[in-house]
Amino acid sequence: MATKKVNHITKEGFDKLVTELNHYKQVELPAVHERLSEAKAL
């Protein structure tokens, strides 16, 4: 049976990932939705 590899990250690394995720959710995702809506309207 294979063992699971665990990667530990620092608090700063975690905070950076959370910030990046929030950017994608709040900025990038709405922009993609807008482009998809425009494409559907064509």
Image (spheres, grey):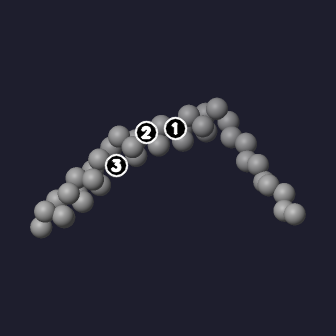
Q: How far from the left and from the top, in percent, is residue 37?
A: 20, 57
Q: Where is residue 18? Give x, y as percent.
A: 52, 38
The quadrant of the image that shows the N terminus is bottom right
- The residue that appears at 78% across and 54% down in the rendered structure is 5
Which residue matches tag 1? 18
Quadrant including the C terminus: bottom left
Query: For the view shown, which residue lies furthest in the left direction?
Result: 42
Q: Which mark is residue 22?
A: 2
Name the residue type under label 1. Answer: Val
Please state which of residues 14 and 32 is positioned toward the viewer in this rendering: 32
Mark 2, residues whose alpha carbon is within 10 Å: few (<14), some, or many (≥20)? few
| Of pointers 2 and 3, the one earlier in the residue sequence | 2
Sequence-wise, the earlier of marks 3 and 1 is 1
Kindly state the secondary structure of the residue where label 3 is placed. Answer: helix
Label 1: few (<14), some or many (≥20) within 10 Å?
A: few
Residue at image x 40%, y 46%? 24
Mark 2 to mark 1: distance in Å? 6 Å
Q: Is residue 35 above or below residue 12?
A: below
